Image (cartoon, grey):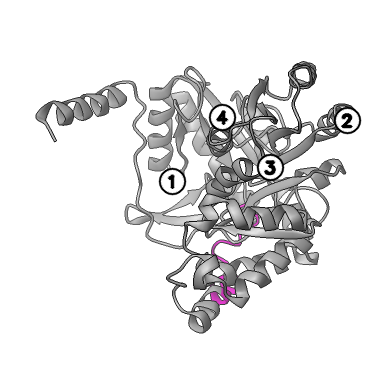
């Protein structure tokens, strides 16, 4: 490697810092939960994807320990060689049954699920019509596929219909509409009823990434499609958010689709099988989420979101509209978002500033996220801290 190369890397890092776009990693010295230990002290945590509060739940933790005790640390293999354990099949059945599909396939990460979905199923004769705000993993998965690509403005049904018409006019064999169920940076929920109607009109399939919906949206927490009461063809999701908070992804679909993915999806074929501990924790999280206790947690989660949203609005902050437990506090400037997050930590609340390239330039924000594990008192304390920091920094 040449000195010029390392000089360029150093300059790139310097440019990132000068623009206020550096994304620091703060080390947490405790379990994930509504209160975490950072920098030698306990602070409130309002930026985790821990929607049901199960990431630190003792039952979920012990289920993972028991699975590792029985099955070991891992398989040292991919699934088709000697990496398929009974617990993998159990988890595939559990997530498919929970979400109402025939079958499911597991991946090491939800990013891999989206990266592995399109290429095995679609060819150059086909088309993918993708929402403009879709997660990076969907974008990368679409890029890996030879299908023709079309994009529609976020949740703009007129534009979606325009793109579907164009795909049909271009002679597409099969068309897949790809969308997040809930958009992770904004908390917007996809208009799946309208998308379903257009899919039926133009004979298209629907793919939904429900990472930010599975476990807590819709009846029994089955996701955004259940929330809207519609049928979709493929659902991708994760065990790294509401369903235990560990890692791992999945695709739910028909049995023939899942079988073809197991034969051809590269992230599945060339990645080690999901760790037994993750499977054990995820199974316990699914058990909790789909039952009566899950209903109690979901009720608390959305009550927390409503309380926080109302109080922050009253305090004068600009929030993106919605009802999802992702509630972005819009600030615009990247450096301001970083300064705000740093001051919030000083005030005892852990939040993170989001800026380019995670969100578009000029739309920097602090993405706050509610958990069922938060108390009303903790929410009120957080709003108070935001108000203090907001006044100091001239935000409100």
Label 2 or label 3, whichever lies nearer to me, is 2
Rendered view: 38 above or below 344: below
First in sequence: mark 4 or mark 2?
A: 2
Relative to 184, 338 lies left or right: left
Question: How far separated are the C-alphas under marks 1 and 2?
Answer: 47 Å
* Residue beneath disc 4: 329
Question: How far separated are the C-alphas under marks 2 and 3?
Answer: 30 Å
* Residue beneath disc 1: 348
Are the residues flagged by discs 1 and 4 in contact, CB closer than 8 Å?
no
Please state which of residues 125 and 176 is positioned toward the viewer in this rendering: 125
Q: Residue at x 59, y 61 (%)?
A: 244
Question: How far separated are the C-alphas under marks 3 and 1?
Answer: 20 Å
Residue 330 seen in the figure: yes
* Residue beneath disc 2: 197
Label 1 or label 4, whichever lies nearer to me, is 4
Q: Residues within 10 Å of mark 3 (few under 14, many from 20)?
A: many
Q: Position of residue 119 (x, y in %)?
A: 60, 41
Rendered view: 264 above or below 314: below
Q: Is residue 55 magenta?
A: yes
Please state which of residues 277 and 391 is positioned toward the viewer in this rendering: 277
**Image quadrant occupied by the N terminus:** top left
* Residue beneath disc 3: 305
Residue 373 seen in the figure: no
The kind of secondary structure element at disc 3 is: helix
């Amino acid at each position: 490697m040449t000195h010029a190369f390392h000089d360029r890397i150093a300059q790139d890092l310097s440019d990132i810092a000068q623009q206020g776009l550096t994304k620091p990693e703060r080390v947490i010295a405790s379990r994930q939960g509504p209160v975490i230990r950072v920098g030698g002290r306990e602070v409130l945590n309002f930026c985790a994807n821990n929607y049901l509060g199960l990431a630190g739940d003792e039952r979920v933790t012990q289920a993972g320990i028991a699975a590792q005790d029985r099955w070991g640390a891992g398989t040292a293999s991919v699934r088709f060689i000697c990496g398929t354990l009974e617990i993998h099949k159990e988890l595939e059945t559990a997530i498919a049954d929970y979400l109402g599909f025939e079958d499911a396939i597991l991946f090491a990460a939800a990013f891999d699920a989206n990266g592995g979905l399109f290429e095995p199923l679609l060819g150059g004769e086909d088309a993918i019509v993708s929402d403009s705000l879709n997660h990076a993993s969907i974008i990368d998965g679409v890029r890996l596929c030879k299908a023709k690509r079309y994009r529609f403005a976020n949740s703009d049904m007129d534009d979606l219909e325009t793109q579907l018409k164009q795909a049909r006019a271009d002679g597409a064999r099969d068309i897949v509409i790809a969308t997040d169920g809930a958009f992770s940076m904004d908390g917007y929920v996809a208009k799946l009823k309208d998308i379903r109607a257009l899919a039926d009109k133009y004979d298209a399939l629907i793919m939904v990434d429900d990472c930010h919906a599975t476990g807590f949206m819709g009846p029994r927490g089955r996701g955004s499609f259940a929330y809207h009461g519609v049928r979709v063809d493929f659902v991708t999701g994760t065990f790294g958010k509401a369903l235990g908070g560990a890692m791992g992804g999945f695709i739910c679909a028909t049995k023939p689709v899942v079988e073809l993915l197991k034969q051809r999806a590269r992230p599945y074929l060339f990645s080690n099988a999901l760790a037994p501990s993750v499977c054990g924790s995820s199974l316990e999280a699914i058990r909790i989420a789909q039952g009566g206790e899950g209903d109690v947690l979901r009720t608390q989660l959305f009550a927390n979101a409503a309380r926080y949203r109302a109080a922050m609005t009253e305090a004068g902050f600009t929030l993106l509209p919605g009802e999802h437990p992702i509630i972005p506090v819009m600030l615009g400037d990247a450096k301001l978002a970083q300064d705000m997050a740093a001051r919030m930590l000083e005030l005892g609340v852990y939040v993170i500033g989001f800026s380019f390239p995670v969100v578009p330039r000029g739309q920097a924000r602090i993405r706050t996220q509610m958990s069922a594990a938060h108390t009303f008192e903790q929410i009120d304390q957080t709003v108070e801290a935001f108000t203090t920091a907001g006044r100091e920094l001239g935000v409100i």
